[in-house]
Amino acid sequence: MSKAERQVGREAEAAMPRILCSTDALTATASSDVAVLWKLTESGRQLDANLVRLTPGRHVAPHAEPDLDVLVLVVAGDGVLGAGPRDEPQSLTTGTLLWLPHGSTRSITAGDDGLAYLTVHRRRPGLQIGQSP
């Protein structure tokens, strides 16, 4: 098989839909305070995704993402989203789907059962060295 044929085969394989993980299995075995339980690492992807677990009471401090919209899907547990500059509380439960528009301020606090959520956003471009304008 030629080098070109191997490359075509790799590209075809990369374009195949596939199951990546079981969020139920990953969240059931999580034990650390704050953890990224899973990360999308496939080459050639246009998205980034993470499965994050917060143990009971853990908190992600208020912050804003200036460049990217983020989708968040709660897959286990419960907690509170602090929304906007006044960190207004909104309840999070399993199955809640959030849109966090770029520039919005948000915080997340895990409830008594902890909280696991999937984040998905456009992949950040890699750093590039170039000339200043």
Image: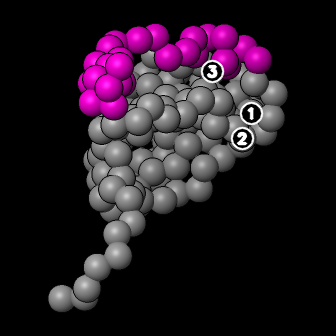
Q: CA distance from mark 3 to mark 2?
A: 14 Å
The residue wearing badge 3 is 77
Residue found at the far front of this picture? 2
From the image, state whether disc 3 or disc 2 is nearer to you: 2
Task: Find out whether the residues at labels 3 and 1 contact each other: C-beta distance under 8 Å.
Answer: no
Quadrant housing the C terminus = bottom left
| Image location of residue 10, percent across then percent down | 36, 24
Task: Find out whether the residues at labels 2 and 1 contact each other: C-beta distance under 8 Å.
Answer: yes
Residue 20, placed above or below residue 84:
above
Does residue 100 appear anywhere in the picture? no
Task: Find out whether the residues at labels 3 and 2 contact each other: C-beta distance under 8 Å.
Answer: no
Q: Earlier in the sequence, mark 3 or mark 1?
A: 1
Residue name at image x 76 percent, y 17 percent = 29
**Most common SS among magenta residues:** helix
Which of 1 and 43 lies nearest the eye of the viewer? 1
The residue wearing badge 1 is 55
| Image location of residue 46, percent across then percent down | 30, 38
SS assignment at label 3: strand
| Quadrant of res 113 | top right
Q: CA distance from mark 2 to mark 1?
A: 6 Å
Q: Earlier in the sequence, mark 3 or mark 2?
A: 2
SS assignment at label 1: loop
> Residue 15: within the magenta?
yes
Q: Earlier in the sequence, mark 2 or mark 1?
A: 2
Kind of residue indicated by mark 2: Val
Which stretch appears magenta? 1-29
Quadrant housing the N terminus = top left
Which of 6 and 21 lies nearest the eye of the viewer? 6
> Would you call the spot at circle 3 few (<14 residues within 10 Å), some (14-19), or many (20 or more)?
many
The residue wearing badge 2 is 34
